[in-house]
Amino acid sequence: MGHRKVTAVLSLAEGTVGLAVRVRQAAEDVRRHFTVALIALAGDPVMPETAPSTLADAVSAVAASHEAAATKWPHMLTVSR
């Protein structure tokens, strides 16, 4: 079912479903980018387990690179006194 039919069935704005389609299309690029970031940030990176979809893989890579950055720079995004 195309995104126009989905929007009609769910009574959503067409842009909402279109955005979801674009995010899913970019998921492999996002996964690749954040996997490279994870490798650069972590001394001994633990790669995320393979997920059932490319989008889930991308989310796992983002979360793993976030955790590696937080470990490398623990005071990042904190407010000084």
Image: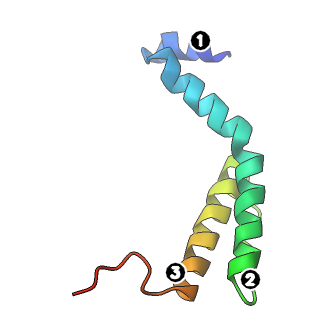
Going from N to C along the chain, the mark reached first, 2 or 3, is 2
Mark 3 surroundings within 10 Å by alpha-carbon count, few (fewer than 14), some (14 through 19), many (20 or more): some
Circle 3 sits in a helix, a strand or a loop, which is it? helix
Residue 70 appears at what percent x and percent y?
52, 80
For the point 62% across and 62% down, the residue is 62
Q: Which residue is mark 1?
A: 4
For the point 39% across and 75% down, the residue is 77
Residue 54: in sight, yes or no?
no
Residue 54 appears at what percent x and percent y?
74, 49
The amino acid marked with disc number 1 is: Arg
Q: Quadrant of residue 20?
A: top right
For the point 76% across and 76% down, the residue is 39
Residue 16 appears at what percent x and percent y?
49, 25
77 vs 24, left or right, is: left
How far apart are the alpha carbons under marks 2 and 1? 41 Å
For the point 44% across and 17% down, the residue is 13
Whether residue 27 is situated above or below residue 16 in the rendered picture: below
The amino acid marked with disc number 3 is: Ala
Mark 1 surroundings within 10 Å by alpha-carbon count, few (fewer than 14), some (14 through 19), many (20 or more): some
Q: Which residue is mark 2?
A: 45
How far apart are the alpha carbons under marks 2 and 3? 13 Å
Viewer-nearest residue: 9 or 80: 80
Whether residue 69 is situated above or below residue 9 in the rendered picture: below
Circle 2 sits in a helix, a strand or a loop, which is it? loop
The amino acid marked with disc number 2 is: Pro
Q: Which mark is residue 70?
A: 3
